[in-house]
Amino acid sequence: MSDLLQRLRGRGWRMTSQRRVVAEVLDGDHVHLTADEVHALAVDRLPEISRATVYNTLGEMVSLGEVTELSTDGRAKRYDPNAHRPHQHLVCSGCGVIRDVHPAGDPLTDLPPDQRYGFTVSEAAITYRGLCPGCA
Amino acid sequence: MSDLLQRLRGRGWRMTSQRRVVAEVLDGDHVHLTADEVHALAVDRLPEISRATVYNTLGEMVSLGEVTELSTDGRAKRYDPNAHRPHQHLVCSGCGVIRDVHPAGDPLTDLPPDQRYGFTVSEAAITYRGLCPGCA
DNA sequence: TCCTATGATGGACTGGGTCCAGGTCAAGAA
DNA sequence: TTCTTGACCTGGACCCAGTCCATCATAGGA
C-alpha cells in the first residue's frame, strides 16, 4: 500500500475506490502533479472517476495536512504528497521541473522580530529558481 | 512623478497615458494589487482603459524586471512594484494581507551543493505565513 | 506636419477550478 | 448477511483570471 494511503487510513478517512486511486497516483518522491495530471492518471485505473472528485479529494488531503499545494508557475496548482516531511522546492525556470530540497538552517529564525509586524509567523516556504542541467 | 514611472522612463519606455496611469496606481510600499484591482483604480483616472492593456502593461513591467509577480493564494496574481529592492513576503493566512519583509542572511547560501541537482540556482523567494494581529 | 511602428481596444475565447442536484455506496447496526 | 443512512461521486453548468486577435489610435521621429 502506498505511504500516503496508509497515512490517510490512519486518520479514519472513509475509503472509496476513487480516493484510493488518487492517493496511489499521487504517492512518491519528487511528485508534483497538477489536478488534471492526477485525473488523467486516475482515469487509467478507474475510467469513470470525475474531475470534480479529483479536485475534492485533493482538497481534502490538503486540509488534512497530508498533501501540500504549490503554485510555482501561476498556472495550475501542483500537489506534493510529502507534506509529512518538511522541505522546500527548486524549480527550473526553463522547463518547470521541480525538485524537493532540504536547505540548511531554519528560515523562520531568519525573520527578525522587527520584521514580523505583530504576526504570529508559523511557516516559511522557499522556492529556489534556476536552470536545470538540461536547460542550462 | 512616481518612483516606478521614473525608472521606466529611464529605460526609454514609450510613454502613453495608459502606461502612466498603471505605473502611478501601482507605485508605493507594501503594494500588492491584482490585475483587476489595478484596472479598477486605473479606470478612476482614465475611464476608457481596457483590461487587456492593464494585463499587457503589467506583463511588460515584469519582463523589464521593474515589477515582480507573486501568486500567494493560488487565485489572481499580485503585482509588486518594489522589484528594484530585493525582499520577501509575509502573508496572513486569515485575511491575506501581505507585507514586504527583509529577513537576515542570504537564503541562496543555505542550499548546499548536494541539494542543487546540478541546477544553476539564481534566486530564492520566501513566503512566510502566519496570522496578522487582527486575525490572531 | 506627416508617417508609421508601436500601443490600445473590446469582445471572443481558453484553462483551471467550483457548484449543485441527483444517484451511489461504505461501513456500522442488527 | 441485509438494512440503513449519511457521506461520497457524477457530469454538466458555471465562474473567474488571463490570453488572443483584428482593428483602431497615437507617440514621437523625420
Image: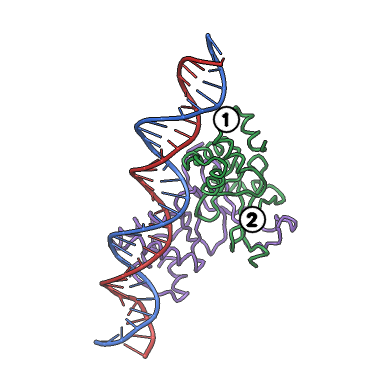
Chain colours: A green, B purple, C blue, D red
> Chain under label 1?
A
> Which residue is more in the foreground, B113 or B8?
B113
Estimate how packed mark 2 is, as few (under 14), some (14 to 19) or many (20 or more) residues with alpha carbons within 10 Å.
many
Residue A43 marker: none
Mark 1 residue type: Met
> Chain under label 2?
A
Q: Is residue A59 above or below residue C11?
A: above
Q: In the figure, is residue A77 to the left or right of B56? A: right
Q: Position of residue B26 (x, y in %)?
A: 42, 60
> Which residue is more in the foreground, C14 or B66?
C14
Residue at label 1? A15
Q: Residue at x 60, y 43 (%)?
A: A25
Estimate how packed mark 1 is, as few (under 14), some (14 to 19) or many (20 or more) residues with alpha carbons within 10 Å.
few
Q: Position of residue B98 (x, y in %)?
A: 49, 49
| Cα–Cα gap, marks 2 and 1 | 33 Å
Q: Nearer the viewer, mark 2 or mark 1?
A: 1
Residue A90 marker: 2
User: On the image, which quarter does residue B42 sit in?
Assistant: bottom left
- Is residue B105 in sight in this rendering? yes
Mark 2 residue type: Leu
Q: Residue at x 64, y 29 (%)?
A: A10
Give the mark, 2 or 1, whose residue is nearer the N terminus: 1
C-beta proximity under 8 Å, tags 2 and 1: no
Q: Is residue B112 above or below residue A35?
A: below
